[in-house]
Image: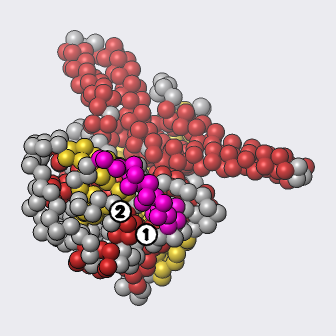
Amino acid sequence: MTRAFAEPSGGPARAAARPSAPAVRASTETVQVLVINGGDPYLPAFLAIDGAMRRAMAERRPGPVVWLNESIDTLRLGAAPSPILAELLARKYAGVRIDAVLLVTESAVDFYLQHRQQLWPQAPALYHFVAPDYAARLPAAAGLSGVPVHVDYAGAVRLALALQPHARRALVMAGVSPFDDVQAAGFRAALDAERKRLAAEFVVGEPLGAAAERLAHLTDDTIVLYASLFRDRDGNVYVPRAALETLGARSAVPIYGVFESQIGHGLTAGAIESLADRGALVADLVRRALAGELAPATVEPPPAARCVADGRRLERFGLTARWLPADCEIRFVEPGFFQRYAWQSVLVGLAFVAQSLLIAALLLQRRRRAAELSLQAQRVQLLHASRLAVAGELTASIAHEINQPLAAILSNAEAAELLLHDGRADRDELLAILSDIRRDDLRASEVIERLRALLARHDTQRRRFDLNGAVEAAAAILRAEARRRHVAVDYDLRARRAEVLGDPVQIQQVLINLVLNALEASAEQPPAARRVRVETRDSATAATLTVRDFGAGIAADDLVRVFDPLFSTKRSGMGLGLTIVRSIVEAHGGTIAAAAAGPGAEFRVVLPHAPQADTP
Ligand code: ADP
């Protein structure tokens, strides 16, 4: 088996057969460059490098370049290419002029050095995507120039620790192919330097399904580092990026890595080299070699590794980009509220403006009764629109909450199918599986039912209802969102006479708006301070609902202004949430006030008890 990243095995005697003066090609002449890839040239990273290399070459060299491609694929398959392959290539290209040979990965360099006498000894040979120490060990007499790759494993570990400072354990996910081994070894060395802070664990060769399941059950005291998964111990072959997508979809914690092609496909952050920069560097090297401008055995420094993160995944795990280095590039930043809900925002805004204009016009005409009725209708519409907007904010967590029982149903159904196929079906076991399926189905439909109740368009109700019950219904809707943002929400519902008169769905909306603000205010806090407290209490005449957080709090000057329409200190805030909350509370005959509560903010809603005699 050829080692993918190992000692150069060309042997000095043969390697010394370097041409003394390769033919120089004028920059307008057509040239033919043969690329030999030691791996799968269709891997996303190679495709990205190749594309950038061709573009840069077309920009910098006036004459046409014909790219010829061969792959020996030992990186993935792990078998030594037979000398017959060299023979075959020599025959295939007999009579074809090769002006330069570009060797991608160490196994391609090894292969070439072994068979150079047969394979275009006159052409300049260049390499890239090899380890720096491998490049340093290449015999100088071979005269190979190239761009090694510096994979920044330690950088990835540092980023992980910046985002998960309380982590105590690091899990490295790797396969068993030669390349997978090299990646795992890189992380092993980086983790060794952190052994006082992190216990390192290596999951090597686990089949993809089991590995994904393992990640689904982790908690955020564990850092997951993705080495590479070309092959598992059962011999299944994967594209590492596609395997990462499966892991990323299931993982309960962020995954970190070192390759740019994996950003956007499951990594939360990585210390990575730009593939486009690499392509451009390699193109320049090839161009200089063709023009005879390159000194033999030139080693170009690789592009520097830098921090890149996936904004969507930071958001999914409730992480803030502020903990990353200031120059970290955040990709896939989710559009702000206004961009995402552009037309809904315009609608809500228009409804708001229309409402104000209408009130003014109707008041002017002293048609108060008509104005009230019309206002009522506008209000119902506005409240409904704002509930839809809130549901939009909760989409990610709701999808997750529905997905979980659906995934459980699927795996139970598959298990049952397997039992039936194998003829092992035991009636009791099948009954137990069916009962699990029914339970998970009910769980999913409960989530949908709760949402339907919140989102249905209905006229404002006026009935007697239990404040604690409304809080519990809203709590069920908020649960997944709080978990997603890693905020602990405690409910302490001690109001005994909690009956109020009005619309329970609107009171749910009040609580949802207040708690969402509190969750957002908690995001910047360290994990221990990410707490929100919801309380109900009662006095002789009224029930009180309090929402308290331990976030940045509210400046004294803003305590009253927060309820003003369009007042917002958030980048993509609309400044309507608290205005709507206050209008609902006042329509219920109640009051709301904001207070700075030591660290954090507190919102207190007071609602009068329903009169004893009132009937529903
Ligand atoms: P939005 O959330 O769109 O900004 P809101 O009307 O809900 O609109 O809130 C208005 C402003 O009140 C917010 O931008 C923020 O400055 C402040 N605010 C609301 N809740 C809190 C809180 N729990 N902690 C700190 N500030 C808050």
Local SS, label 1: loop
Q: Is residue 255 left or right of residue 571?
A: right
* Of labels 1 and 2, the one closer to you: 2
Dot 1 crowding, Cα within 10 Å, few <14, some 14–19, many 20+: many
Residue drawn at the location 20% of the way across and 44% of the way down: 65
User: Looking at this view, is 526 or 207 the one in front?
Assistant: 207
As drawn, the residue found furthest toward the front would be 95
Question: Does the segment drawn in magenta span residue 109?
Answer: no
Give the residues in magenta: 70-96
**Residue 241 visible in the snapshot:** no
User: Looking at this view, is 512 or 484 the one in front?
Assistant: 484
Residue 313 falls in which quadrant of the image?
bottom left
Quarter of the image for the C terminus: give it: top right
User: On residue 118, which mark appears?
Assistant: 2
Residue bearing the label numbered 1: 4
Rendering coords of residue 57 (x, y %): 17, 48
